[in-house]
């Protein structure tokens, strides 16, 4: 269900630029100055930059207090993982429009303004941005497309647009990447924020955007918002026991069990999952079996979520997946 209340003129509103960091002192030193410059360039007196330190042990807190006293800083004494730290810093933000960044992202100083007019549409939840790598030329990510294949939603396909293709209207995206996304705080809070089930990281942004689509709220892509992403700068600092591929496998299962609702898609998901599990048993793929076992431990929480939230679901899974594909088709299949 879309929010039908009249929307303020968001093109002239203040914004909160927020990030969370775990053992990322050097990344913050490198990247925070560009966020502060962008906030100043945008020029609204209510603009702010907010940082949550997720229990780091690398001197982040001391560095922040010494070098960035103008930043609203939140120190979490114990590490809670990316979803919990993200929720904590967003709760501290004073503005309705949050621009959420990873700590390994630099921005162009004029990247804020193009995102804001999208929020004059009260059904827009989030605006995801164009990212290049730190070399400033290699395309990293844009609008996100999802496809259902062999029992799973493949959610990491990107598309981009040229300036000549901009008049096509809304450029739909399956979700907004947490490294560089703007969204409404009220809608974020109404959905309960990022789900700690995905701790320490990965899939929480896909989950959030998909939940918004379930409620009929849109995520759109704005390529004029340009950022530069040092990919996995923080993830590389995680302990070996939290390797990305293993965590991603577990969280991908949680995502599907939590949100997939179309009967035919559920059937094919469990059909392929059964055969994949059987194959893993016979080929001794212990990491997959461990990920499956840990995901199964989350089933009571998943069931409770579905029972509480399904009353808000207004779009079917195929309709949600079809929105970014509709944009991709208008672009002639360009990625």
Image: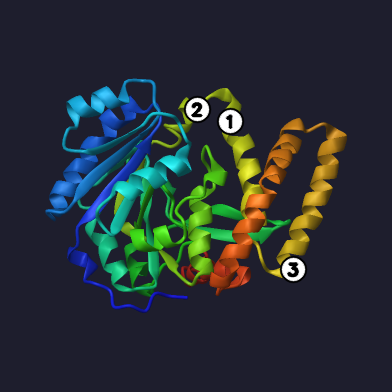
Q: Which residue is mark 3?
A: 264
How far is disc 1 from disc 2 in space, using C-alphas?
8 Å
- Residue 209 x, y percent position in the rendering: 48, 59
- Residue 155 x, y percent position in the rendering: 57, 54
How far is disc 2 from disc 3 in space, using C-alphas?
38 Å
Classed neighbour count for the residue bearing mark 3: other residues with Cα under 10 Å, few (<14), some (14–19), many (≥20): few
- Residue 77 x, y percent position in the rendering: 39, 29
Q: Which residue is mark 2?
A: 238
Task: Give the side of residue 80 with respect to residue 96, left or right.
Answer: right
Residue 243, numbered label = 1
Say which element carries label 1: loop
Say which element carries label 3: helix
Seen in the picture, residue 129 relative to 5 is either above or below; the reply is above
Task: Give the side of residue 198 with respect to residue 217, left or right.
Answer: right
How far is disc 1 from disc 3 in space, using C-alphas?
32 Å
Q: Nearer the viewer, residue 162 or 245?
A: 245
- Residue 29 position by quadrant: top left
Which residue does the image show at 57% across and 59% down from the upper left?
A: 146
Q: Nearer the viewer, residue 140 or 88?
A: 88
């Amino acid at each position: 269900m879309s929010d039908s209340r009249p929307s303020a003129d968001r093109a002239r509103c203040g914004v909160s630029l927020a990030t969370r960091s775990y053992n990322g002192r050097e990344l913050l030193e490198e990247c925070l100055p560009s966020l502060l410059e962008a906030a100043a360039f945008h020029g609204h007196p209510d603009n702010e930059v907010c940082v949550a330190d997720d229990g780091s042990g690398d001197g982040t807190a001391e560095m922040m207090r010494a070098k960035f006293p103008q930043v609203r800083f939140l120190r979490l004494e114990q590490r809670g993982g990316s979803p919990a730290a993200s929720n904590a810093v967003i709760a501290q933000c004073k503005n309705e429009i949050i621009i959420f960044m990873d700590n390994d992202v630099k921005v162009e100083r004029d990247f804020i303004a193009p995102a804001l007019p999208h929020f004059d549409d009260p059904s827009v939840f989030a605006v995801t941005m164009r990212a290049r790598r730190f070399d400033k030329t290699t395309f990293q990510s844009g609008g996100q497309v999802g496809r259902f294949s062999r029992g799973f939603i493949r959610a990491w396909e990107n598309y981009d647009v040229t300036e000549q293709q901009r008049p096509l209207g809304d450029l739909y995206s399956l979700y907004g990447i947490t490294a560089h996304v703007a969204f409404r705080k009220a809608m974020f809070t109404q959905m309960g924020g990022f789900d700690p089930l995905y701790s320490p990281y990965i899939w929480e942004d896909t989950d959030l955007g998909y939940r918004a689509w379930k409620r009929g709220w849109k995520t759109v892509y704005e390529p004029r918002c340009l950022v530069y992403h040092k990919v996995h700068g923080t993830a590389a600092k995680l302990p070996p026991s939290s390797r990305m591929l293993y965590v991603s496998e577990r969280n991908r299962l949680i995502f599907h069990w939590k949100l997939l609702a179309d009967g035919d898609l559920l059937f094919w998901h469990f059909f392929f999952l059964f055969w994949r599990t059987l194959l893993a048993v016979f080929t001794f793929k212990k990491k997959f079996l461990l990920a499956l076992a840990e995901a199964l431990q989350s089933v009571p929480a998943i069931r409770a979520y579905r029972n509480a939230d399904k009353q808000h679901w207004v779009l079917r899974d195929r309709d949600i997946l079809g929105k970014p594909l509709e944009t991709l088709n208008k672009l002639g299949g360009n990625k």
